[in-house]
Image: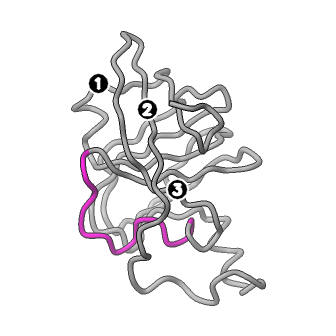
Amino acid sequence: MACSVALLIAASVAAPGQPASEPTHAQPTLQTEELVIVSAGGARHVFHVEVARTPEQQITGLMFRKSVTPDGGMLFPWDPPIESRMWMENTLVPLDMVFIKADGTIGRIVENTVPQSLAIISSDGPVVATLELKGGITSKLGILVGDHVQSKALGATP
């Protein structure tokens, strides 16, 4: 799954409340919230995403999952904002990574990430969240950089 490199480093020292080793299996389904992406033309794309809030949830992310539904995914909120650096270790399906800036707009999209790759996928600047969606869905729906993201987890009710 895509993981924050900083979180993996933190986990490797086995701090209290954090996992002592890398995940070996998919985590249970996390709390799901509605997330809406509003395109420049006004189209609304509704997703029901799991929210990875704790370091352990964020480290495991979508690792070992065999599928992601077209209206599903996972949201990684970052507080404070960070330059998000993700990868696809132990992630079995391609994902679209959507990096969300503090103003709620999409700052960068990386489509169809390569399963099991260790290549770093960066937000290229500070973001308040990383959203992982089914690979290819952003192109299919016409979701673009600059579109606006609404989610309770980000303080903007859809």
What's the residue type where badge 3 is placed? Val
Percent x, y of residue 121: 49, 51
Badge 3 element: strand
Give the magenta-colored segment's residue range. Answer: 58-70
Which quadrant would residue 58 be assigned to in this image? bottom right
Q: Secondary structure at mark 1?
A: loop
Crowding at mark 1 (Cα within 10 Å: few <14, some 14-19, many 20+): few
Q: Which residue bears the numbered disc 2?
A: 36
Q: CA distance from mark 3 to mark 1?
A: 23 Å
Q: Earlier in the sequence, mark 1 or mark 2?
A: 2
Q: Which badge, 2 or 3, comes first in the chain's sequence?
A: 2
Viewer-nearest of discs 3 and 1 = 3
Q: Residue at x 26, y 29 (%)?
A: 141
Q: Please check the rendered image and state whether residue 67 is part of the magenta-colored stretch, yes or no.
A: yes
Q: Number of callouts in the render?
A: 3
What secondary structure characterizes most of the magenta part? loop
Q: For the N terminus, give its image quadrant.
A: bottom left
Which residue appears at 39% of the width and 83% of the height? 25
Give the numbered dot on residue 142. Answer: 1
* Residue 77 or residue 96, whichever sits in front: 77
Task: Give the alpha-carbon distance from disc 1 to disc 2, as whole Å.
Answer: 14 Å
Point out residue 138 in the picture as x, y percentages from the top left corner.
Answer: 31, 35
Q: Are marks 1 and 2 in contact (CB under 8 Å)?
A: no
